[in-house]
């Protein structure tokens, strides 16, 4: 037996939190890579004599939304790391990082593919792989839906 009698669930919660905490930075890195690719493509791809960035307001607005989501994830990553470093077990934050890491990386990869058009689905761009990897983050280790339920119970029990 590891730990005190009937204490296995808490031990699992704490050990799983370390895994979940890593999903935030992983998702952040994936989102940043997709964003950079999309931004560069929109600046280089010329349509009707102008770059996509200059010609289409929709392109600029997509990039702004992507950037905003990336920065919100970055803030959660840093604040969660600071709590963890101060000795807080960060049970809810770890689960939030997994969920937010997935959501942001999948969203940014999806939007980047949309900006690239059909080219975005080709293996050579790498965007499709980021999208698939983000999707796996949503289900591997624990589904985002199950984690959201755990977070809800932590909120109810004032554990956040």
Image: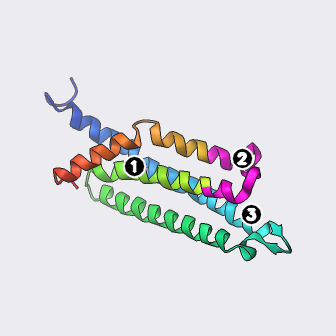
Picture quarter with the N terminus? top left
The answer to whether marks 3 and 1 mark residues whose Cβ atoms lie closer than 8 Å is no
Where is residue 32 drawn, in percent x and y? 59, 60
Residue bearing the label numbered 3: 41
Earlier in the chain: of badge 2 and badge 1, it is 1
- Which of 106/95 is in front? 106
Where is residue 77 drawn, in percent x and y? 42, 59
Q: Residues within 10 Å of mark 2 (few under 14, many from 20)?
A: some
Where is residue 57 drawn, in percent x and y? 66, 74
Residue at 81%, 75% (x, y): give it: 50
Residue range in magenta is 111-130
Residue bearing the label numbered 1: 21
Where is residue 69 drawn, in percent x and y? 50, 64
Report the label total: 3
Residue at 45%, 65% (x, y): give it: 72
Report which quarter residue 60 is drawn in. bottom right
Side (left or right) of 62 relative to 122: left
Residue bearing the label numbered 2: 121
> Is label 3 in a helix, a strand or a loop?
helix
């Amino acid at each position: 037996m590891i730990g005190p009698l009937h204490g296995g669930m808490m031990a699992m919660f704490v050990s799983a939190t370390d895994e979940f905490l890593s999903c935030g930075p992983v998702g952040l890195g994936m989102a940043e890579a997709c964003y950079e690719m999309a931004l560069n493509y929109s600046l280089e791809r010329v349509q009707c004599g102008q770059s996509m960035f200059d010609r289409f307001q929709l392109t600029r607005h997509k990039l702004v939304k992507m950037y905003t989501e990336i920065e919100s994830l970055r803030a959660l990553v840093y604040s969660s790391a600071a709590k963890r470093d101060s000795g807080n077990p960060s049970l809810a934050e770890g689960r939030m990082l997994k969920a937010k890491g997935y959501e942001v990386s999948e969203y940014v990869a999806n939007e980047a593919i949309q900006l690239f058009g059909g080219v975005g689905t080709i293996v050579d761009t790498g965007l499709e792989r980021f999208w698939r990897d983000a999707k796996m983050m949503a289900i591997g280790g624990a589904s985002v839906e199950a984690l959201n339920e755990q977070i809800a119970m932590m909120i109810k029990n004032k554990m956040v």
